[in-house]
Amino acid sequence: MKMYIVTAFDKKGEKLYEESFEAPNNDEAKKIGQKVLEENKYENMTHRVTSPAGELVLFHR
């Protein structure tokens, strides 16, 4: 399992939320990240999920 980070930002670019989670691959990390964002009501904010290598797995502006 790899460690991924989901982050949400406000319109000014200030970090509103950040959480680490484990996933076996980028596809699963994308699904988990979307679920976390929806559960915390950040799905319509600017957000990203990054991999341990720094890749953007999910990005929404």
Image (cartoon, helix red, strand yellow):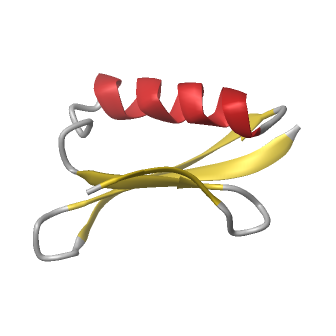
Q: Is residue 49 left or right of residue 18?
A: right
Identify the residue at horizontal 83%, vertical 45% (top origin).
Answer: 2
Q: Quadrant of the C terminus?
A: bottom left
Identify the residue at horizontal 56%, vertical 25% (top origin).
Answer: 31
Give above or below for 13 relative to 60. Answer: below
Residue 56 percent across, percent down from the top left: 58, 59
Give above or below for 50 relative to 13. Answer: above
Among all residues in the image, which is located at the extreme left? 11
**Count of marks overlaid on the render:** 0
Q: Quadrant of the N terminus?
A: top right
Q: Is residue 34 left or right of residue 12?
A: right
Q: Is residue 21 left or right of residue 45?
A: right
Identify the residue at horizontal 28%, vertical 32% (top origin).
Answer: 40
Residue 36 percent across, percent down from the top left: 43, 30
Give above or below for 29 relative to 57. Answer: above
Residue 18 percent across, percent down from the top left: 43, 55
Q: Nearer the viewer, residue 41 or 26?
A: 26
Among all residues in the image, which is located at the extreme right? 1
Identify the residue at horizontal 58%, vertical 35% (top origin).
Answer: 30
